Amino acid sequence: MPEMEKKVLVFRVPEYDQNLMDEKVEEIFSRLPAARELNPGTRVLIKPNLLAKHPPEHGVTTHPAVVLGVIRACKRRGVPAEQITVADSSGGLYNPALMKGVYQASGLWQVCQEEGVECYTQCRYEAKRGEGKLVHQFNLIQPVLEADFIIDLPKMKTHVMTGYTGAVKNLFGCIPGLQKAELHTRFPKKEAFGHMLVDLLELVKPQMAILDGILAQEGDGPAGGTPRKVGLLMASQDLPALDLATCRLIGLDPMEVPYLWAAHERGLCPAAFDPVCLDGEREAFDEIKDYRLPSSYGTGRGSDLDFARYQKLPGFMKKGIKKLEELAAPRPVIRRDRCIGCGKCAEICPGHTIRVEGKAKIDPKGCIRCFCCHEMCPVKAIDVKQIKLFKL
Ligand code: SF4
Ligand code: SF4
């Protein structure tokens, strides 16, 4: 990849002020060479993070001001409104009524209406073959297949399963509805899950990503954490590089993030971010010392991510460590006082291990610790807990 394509641009955007947003998004478009491909004939897909039905102030979904800034920048390059589509598949079921509700709650529906841009609710999908390491064919939502130019708009968030969720992980929303849960079942181990996401990245190949790090999320994200003002808009044509940069910013080891580890294994990125790749308002990139990481992060227990630490040990020792990890792995625990019995966790659970009889109950035997239930619970009634005895 030529030099500029590996660059990570960083800009200070303290608030969702539309004028400032438009200015910074325009600067991103003018600096990233890929944007020169945009012309009146280009079909553009804008892929936000719309995990579930959340208003912008929760810091869970890509803010409408970012989406509007990107629509305007595309239009300035001659792309007509009818060739721009905003599309995502949230967690849970994938149907027109549910998707419309998610777009409306996030504020994207209103922006698209005003701009004459389609918010995709038809919920069609098709298979696309690739040459992945683990997955040779993915079902993808239709706008992904029809676009000539994909702009990925992730949100800066921590994640209880993968540590961090950014540009690469945001592509998981190209998989329709509950088929995401099926992929969790097929790839319950983090290494394989990471490689699956990299296969998806290689198939979807967005031309650029712009990260909404203005109101981010810390702690037990991607939905159960706490909103955190960071005030940054970051962008790159190289999605793993953008994620490496964000990991550095929030003090998270990228090799603990399954998909970044997998990308590194495949020679797609280094093991850590090199600040020489920074561009834009470089002085805005101050590492954050007190960013709260997920409670499941950094212990390696129950994960298969202790590659660096354990790879060289003899087999019998690895087995023992794995057993300990298994016992002390972080697990989802229902807070009965908060549970409203809505059943969203049971609907998405790939292990089919949640029953809802008034309140939800998890049978730990079938749990693969994907934490989809934690992501989808609308009232933060699912905690992530670990047995303290094993905390090193
Ligand atoms: S109980 Fe939660 S973490 Fe366990 S498999 Fe089901 S959705 Fe995943
Ligand atoms: S735990 Fe959350 S998602 Fe599950 S039934 Fe209770 S309120 Fe609904």
Image: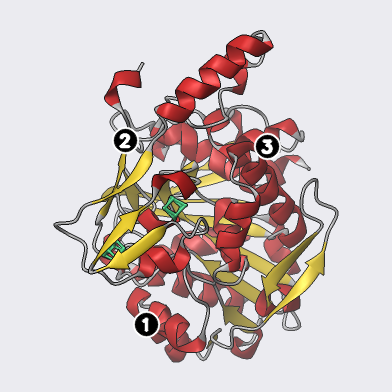
Where residue 8 sits: x, y (%)? 58, 43
Q: Quadrant of the C terminus?
A: top left
Residue that label 1 marks: 104
Q: CA distance from mark 2 to mark 1?
A: 30 Å
Q: Residue at x 54, y 15 (%)?
A: 320
User: Looking at the image, do the residues carrying marks 2 and 3 touch, with CB atoms under 8 Å apart?
Assistant: no
Farthest left residue in view: 337
Where, by quadrant of the figure, is residue 140 drawn? bottom right
Say whether residue 304 is left or right of residue 281. Answer: right
User: Looking at the image, do the residues carrying marks 2 and 1 touch, with CB atoms under 8 Å apart?
Assistant: no
Say whether residue 388 is left or right of residue 39. Answer: left
Q: Is residue 169 visible?
A: yes
- Three-letter amino acid code at disc 3? Ala
Residue that label 3 marks: 262
| Vertical comparison of 225 with 80: above or below | above
Where residue 296 sits: x, y (%)? 38, 35
Residue that label 2 marks: 291
- Three-letter amino acid code at disc 2? Tyr
Q: Callout 1: 10 Å neighbours few (<14), some, many (20+)?
A: some
Where residue 103 sits: x, y (%)? 42, 79
Q: Callout 3: 10 Å neighbours few (<14), some, many (20+)?
A: many
Q: Residue at x 60, y 75 (%)?
A: 74
Q: Secondary structure at mark 1?
A: helix
